[in-house]
Image (cartoon, rainbow, N blue to C red):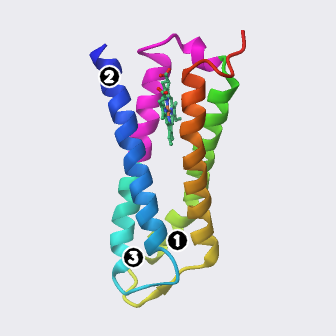
Amino acid sequence: MTTDLLLRYFHFLGIFAMFALLTVQHMQLKGQVEAGGMRKIAVMDAVYGGSALIVLLCGLGMWFWVGKPAGFYSQNWVFHTKITLFVLVGILSFMPTRFILKNRRNTTAVSVPKSITMMIRVELLLMCIIPLLAVLMANGVGYIN
Ligand code: HEM
């Protein structure tokens, strides 16, 4: 029971951290980033990656280890849609991360391509849809016998 609660708690904490960091990244990674600003964004991006890992590990723990039987989730198409969107968020974050890492040591201002800002926007949109799918699947919507 305690493990179940802890995994739930850290699943949520990770989600809140992901939202917060992605929102700040969206505000900072547009137009021109001043000299030295990229280094701070790189640190934020690394913490964002760490938060996503916590969300993933706690999610997997609730799926295969504690709580309801694994079949409750494995046989639910809404759950699989949720996982797919999470994977998409991961794929979309690849380009911004590569851009940040490439420019993190720049000593001059860096201009951010519009495509990078757009990718972060789509990530945020997907992150808003995932909790709806989570609430639905947790209540058995989408379960296939
Ligand atoms: C691969 C990644 C993920 C896995 C494996 C996973 C798995 C799970 C599992 C097994 C539960 C427990 C559901 C229950 O109470 O029966 C859960 C709950 C939840 N997850 Fe995730 N999750 C993942 C990612 C995410 C993400 C990225 C978000 C949000 C952006 C999210 C939002 C939620 C919410 C809001 C709940 C609580 C649902 C409720 O109790 O009503 N999950 N997740």
Apparent side of residue 2 relative to residue 41 in the rendered image (left or right): left
Answer with left or right where residue 86 lies relative to residue 53: right
Q: Which mark is residue 38?
A: 3
Query: Element type at marker 1?
Result: helix
Q: Quadrant of the C terminus?
A: top right
Q: Residue at x 62, y 77 (%)?
A: 114
| In magenta stretch: residue 65 | yes
**Residue 99 has which mark?**
1
Q: Of marks 2 and 1, which one's residue comes earlier in the chain?
A: 2
Numbered circle sitting on residue 5? 2
Mark 2 Cβ and ligand 1 under 8 Å apart: no
* Residue depicted at x 31% and y 19%: 3
Q: Amino acid at mark 1?
A: Phe
- Which is more toward the observer, 54 or 129? 129
- At horizontal 49% and vertical 67% (from top left) the residue drawn is 26
Q: Quadrant of residue 52?
A: top left
Segment tinted magenta in the rendering: 51-74
User: Marks 2 and 3, how far apart in space?
Assistant: 37 Å
Name the secondary structure under disc 3. helix
